[in-house]
Image (cartoon, rainbow, N blue to C red):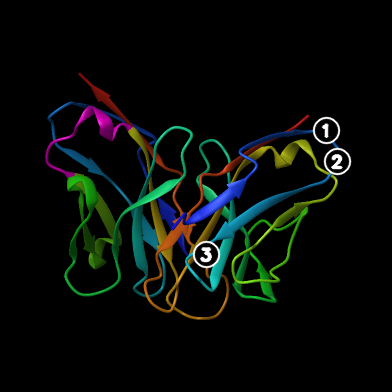
Amino acid sequence: AQSVTQPDIHITVSEGASLELRCNYSYGATPYLFWYVQSPGQGLQLLLKYFSGDTLVQGIKGFEAEFKRSQSSFNLRKPSVHWSDAAEYFCAVGVRSGGGADGLTFGKGTHLIIQP
Amino acid sequence: NAGVTQTPKFRILKIGQSMTLQCTQDMNHNYMYWYRQDPGMGLKLIYYSVGAGITDKGEVPNGYNVSRSTTEDFPLRLELAAPSQTSVYFCASSDRDYSYEQYFGPGTRLTVT
């Protein structure tokens, strides 16, 4: 079964600084990969996704992520964070095959705090 | 489009009571899912459906039941509520054949006391 690890439970970044949130996955084949963001009391909003092709994917709100097969990683980056980026970020893995559960497997999340 | 809607937003249940969490989507998606989110634990899949009349268990199905009589609706039933079912519940849908992206509802916060 696939699994997702987000090693950082909390990250604090100054406003205007760059950001990188780490995500490692375990899966026997190339999965499809997602980053979601959750603001307090809200549902999950998709930031970006990777299915195939270019390993650097662009998302909404100025975020990007890079798929590195050799490292089984899909790290999320932003060159300059804004106070409104403070939220919970989830990395998720999906299985490409049609059999079994079609739901996503989520990491435990990284809580992003923005310092003024 | 409203996307995925869930009702109620909040609910407090006593141990042993039952309730149904409602989920509706207006995107004509075949695939629908129920997740629960516990603090610090991410989301875990409870049940999913690949179309009307077809449902299957996810990772944590015990204590829950689902049905899918229409494409739009995917209610989650809690029978004999227990404190361990205190959680935030999210419904999601996807047009898996096209994008695999899952669209989430705003969630239902359930407390069982």
Neighbour class for label 2 at 10 Å: few (<14), some, many (≥20)?
few
Pinpoint the chain carrying mark 1: B
Horizontal side of A51 relative to B85 (left or right) equals left
Neighbour class for label 3 at 10 Å: few (<14), some, many (≥20)?
many
Question: Looking at the picture, do discs 1 and 2 lie on one chain?
Answer: yes
Horizontal side of A68 relative to B60 (left or right) equals left
Mark 3, residue position = A103
Query: Where in the figure is residue B108, as x and y percent of width and height?
Result: 61, 42
Mark 1, residue position = B14
Name the kind of residue labelled 3 in the image.
Gly
Q: Is residue B14 above or below residue B23?
A: above
Q: Quadrant of the N terminus of chain B?
A: bottom left
For the point 41% across and 62% down, the residue is: A93
Q: Nearer the viewer, mark 3 or mark 1?
A: 1
What separation in Å lies between label 1 and label 2 (alpha carbons)?
6 Å
The answer to whether mark 1 and mark 2 are in CB contact below 8 A is yes
What separation in Å lies between label 3 and label 1 (alpha carbons)?
30 Å
Name the kind of residue labelled 1 in the image.
Lys
Mark 2, residue position = B17
Pinpoint the chain carrying mark 2: B
Q: Quadrant of the C terminus of chain B?
A: top right
Q: Is residue A67 magenta?
A: no
Secondary structure at numbered mark 1: loop
Query: Where in the figure is residue A35, as x and y percent of width and height?
Result: 34, 53
Horizontal side of A87 relative to B86 (left or right) equals left
What separation in Å lies between label 3 and label 2 (alpha carbons)?
28 Å
Q: Is residue A81 magenta?
A: yes
| Magenta segment | A78-86
Q: Nearer the viewer, mark 3 or mark 2?
A: 2
Query: Where in the figure is residue B63, as x and y percent of width and height?
Result: 78, 53
